[in-house]
């Protein structure tokens, strides 16, 4: 006999008994929040599970899930698990061609999708993926004239399920009872920075361990509210919106759309919040733009109280002693500036906010903590249920990802690679025993592929991807990601790619942030016709040069990084884009691909040229292709004398 709560379906039934009337899911639809309590969610999942069974879905089958965060898509995950099946969420913004590999690899016969857009993608793939026999859609708008036999609405299948449930009493309970904690609970496909995506199989036990560990660590309760807006195919959403939610029994809130996330966040006022660094950077960029446009008095007040916050805000948040005068000024700042600012950002109720996925600039970190937002970093990967290191309250370090999480063992290999052993480790890569054996060694340690180091207090610092860390010709370690993150801290820089391995000097490509630089240009009366025009403007180059030279000053002050200052840079004529294969869907640079695609530009940077012509093919959203070309200017940068490392 198993313990009562060792699978997600058993957790679901337990919540239905223990907290039937507490809100479990909310969704904003046509501007109005709809709420389902745990008892209702139990009914919805049961009806769908029985409907899927009636259509022939069985234990061991995989169920594709495609769409934005929707309660019914989360219920579909639970319904598949109730029958002993495995949900496989896909990135909803991926074009049909990118989905074909996963649908084929996971042998998908059943899919639950959000709307007409996703239905069209699957119909387009019928010839490539002939196994697909049943496609259920949540949103019925635009679906009236579709007559394909594979298609059924979510509601129709639930009706079928209610009839099946009546005709087969005890079937649903028996299916849930048959589940084991060692069964796969989800397959998440990695973004594939180095080739075809791999399906990461996570068991109920692994996900539950990550959920329980992180819920206990931050003392989360069933009263929390979270905003679920990150892709369901991403491990972070799986940890927060599925594992933690099912462990603690708190409320998962789904925004109306990607465009309304900020408004919806203000209305919900989440108590726990997760966002990748880019989201925190964008919010701060918007605040900066608004303050630049504000009147003299307002801007003066903002600058004065932000100075107070920078000095004492983080100490007050961490409960450290602060002089009465400073406390009084901070309290006044809270009434006039920080409180209203947090309100505008939807962060008034946040008890804990997390970021992960890329390094976050210390200044960005300081900004949020100084205004009283308990922002922390976590470290993990798809293969570890996003659960390796966490930052304890009061022990936050801007340059580390925290201490090993409860129940996790972390050590460094001789080459500095981070190795992890814990209950949250994947069961393996789907149908890839070769790749599994490469990733998990004979001692049970997962090789993360990240290079790291421990500080004197045992906090882990991630330097870069181990495969990306190189050496310059002078012997200095070259960590491109480390340099790129310093550049991306500036609100004007959206993306950066640094080169230096096997070279005498470091050079970089830069992508401007269209919103921030556009606003900056308009305030100075600079006219431009589009991205390429603005990116090549001499004033934009001056602005970028200031940013690069500030980064150089910071690198010069770091003992081991002084030689990696940027010598030359150029501003790319187009944004790096996942649709052009330059970034992954989680917005990580495909470094090797970019280096090959833009080899002519790298050559120009290193041969001392002052400019270089380039023509690039681009893909538009509707699938058409086109070309953009430009003469790119190359700039030299000022470098400072490097601080020598202590012997």
Image: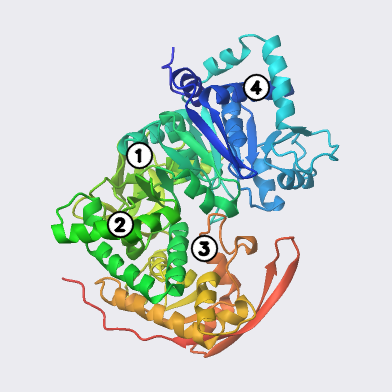
**Residue annotated with mark 4:** 47
For the residues carrying marks 4 and 1, which lies nearer the camera in this image?
Answer: 4
Judge the density around disc 4: few (<14), some (14-19), many (≥20) Cα neighbours within 10 Å: many
**Residue annotated with mark 2:** 334
**Residue annotated with mark 3:** 589
Q: Is residue 159 above or below residue 573?
A: above
The image quarter containing residue 572 is bottom right
Dot placed on the residue nearer the N-terminal end, 4 or 3 = 4
Query: Which residue: 46% across, 85% down?
Result: 542
Dot placed on the residue nearer the N-terminal end, 4 or 1 = 4
Camera-nearest residue between 89 and 253? 253
Whole-Å distance between the Cαs marked 3 and 2? 39 Å
Q: In this view, does 123 lie above or below 604?
A: above
From where the camera sits, is residue 269 visible?
yes
Instruction: Give SS at disc 3.
Output: loop
Quick check: 21 left or right of 532?
A: left
**Residue annotated with mark 1:** 421
């Amino acid at each position: 006999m198993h313990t009562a709560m060792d699978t997600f379906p058993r957790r679901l039934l337990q919540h239905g008994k223990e907290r039937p009337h507490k809100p479990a899911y909310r969704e904003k639809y046509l501007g109005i929040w709809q709420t389902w309590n745990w008892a209702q969610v139990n009914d919805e999942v049961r009806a769908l599970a029985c409907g899927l069974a009636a259509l022939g879905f069985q234990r061991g089958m995989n169920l594709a899930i495609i769409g934005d965060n929707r309660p019914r898509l989360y219920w579909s995950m639970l319904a598949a698990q109730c029958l002993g099946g495995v949900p496989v969420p896909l990135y909803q913004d991926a074009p049909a061609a990118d989905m074909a590999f996963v649908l084929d690899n996971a042998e998908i016969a059943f899919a639950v999708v959000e709307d007409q857009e996703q239905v069209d993608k699957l119909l387009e793939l019928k010839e490539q993926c002939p196994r697909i026999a049943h496609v259920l859609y949540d949103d019925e708008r635009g679906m009236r004239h579709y007559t394909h036999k594979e298609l059924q609405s979510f509601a129709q299948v639930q009706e079928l399920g209610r009839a099946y449930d009546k005709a087969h009493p005890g079937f649903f309970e028996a299916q849930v009872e048959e589940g084991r904690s060692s069964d796969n609970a989800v397959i998440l496909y990695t973004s594939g920075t180095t080739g075809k995506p791999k399906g990461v199989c996570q068991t109920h036990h692994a996900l539950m361990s990550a959920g329980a560990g992180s819920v206990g660590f931050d003392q989360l309760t069933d009263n929390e509210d979270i905003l679920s807006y990150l892709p369901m195919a991403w491990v972070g959403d799986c940890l927060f919106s599925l594992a933690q939610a099912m462990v603690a029994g708190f409320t998962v809130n789904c925004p109306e759309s990607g465009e309304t996330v900020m408004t919806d966040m203000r209305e919900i006022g989440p108590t726990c919040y997760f966002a990748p660094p880019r989201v925190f950077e964008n919010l701060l960029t918007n605040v900066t733009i608004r303050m630049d446009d504000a009147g003299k008095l307002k801007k003066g007040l903002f600058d004065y109280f932000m100075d107070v916050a920078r000095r004492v805000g983080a100490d007050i948040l961490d409960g450290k002693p602060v002089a009465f005068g400073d406390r009084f000024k901070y309290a006044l700042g809270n009434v006039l500036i920080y409180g209203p600012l947090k309100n505008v950002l939807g962060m008034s109720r946040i008890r804990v906010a997390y970021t992960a996925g890329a390094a976050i600039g210390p200044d960005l970190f300081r900004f949020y903590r100084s205004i009283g937002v308990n922002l922390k970093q976590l470290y993990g990967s798809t293969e570890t249920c996003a659960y390796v290191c966490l930052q304890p309250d009061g022990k936050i370090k801007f340059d580390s990802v925290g201490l090993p999480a409860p129940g996790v063992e972390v050590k460094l290999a001789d080459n500095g690679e981070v190795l992890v052993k814990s209950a949250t480790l994947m069961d393996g890569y789907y149908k890839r025993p070769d790749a599994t054996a490469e990733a998990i060694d004979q001692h049970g340690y997962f090789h993360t592929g990240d290079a790291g180091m421990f500080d004197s207090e045992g906090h882990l610092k991630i330097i870069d991807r181990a495969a990306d860390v190189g050496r310059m010709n002078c012997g200095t370690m070259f960590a491109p990601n480390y340099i790129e993150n310093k550049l991306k801290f500036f609100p004007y820089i959206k993306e950066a790619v640094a080169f230096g391995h096997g070279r005498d000097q470091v050079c970089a490509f830069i992508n401007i942030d269209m919103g921030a630089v556009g606003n900056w240009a308009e305030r100075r009366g600079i006219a431009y016709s589009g991205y390429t025009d603005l990116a090549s403007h001499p004033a934009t180059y001056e602005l970028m040069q200031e940013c690069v030279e500030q980064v150089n000053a910071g690198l010069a002050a770091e003992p081991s990084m002084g030689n990696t200052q940027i010598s030359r840079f150029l501003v790319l004529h187009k944004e790096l884009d996942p649709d052009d294969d330059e970034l992954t869907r989680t917005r990580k640079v495909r470094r090797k691909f970019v280096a090959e695609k833009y080899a002519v530009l790298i050559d120009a940077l290193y041969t001392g040229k002052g400019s270089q012509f380039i023509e690039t093919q681009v893909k538009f959203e509707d699938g058409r292709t086109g070309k953009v070309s430009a003469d790119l200017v190359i700039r030299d940068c000022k470098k400072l004398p490097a601080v020598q490392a202590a012997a």
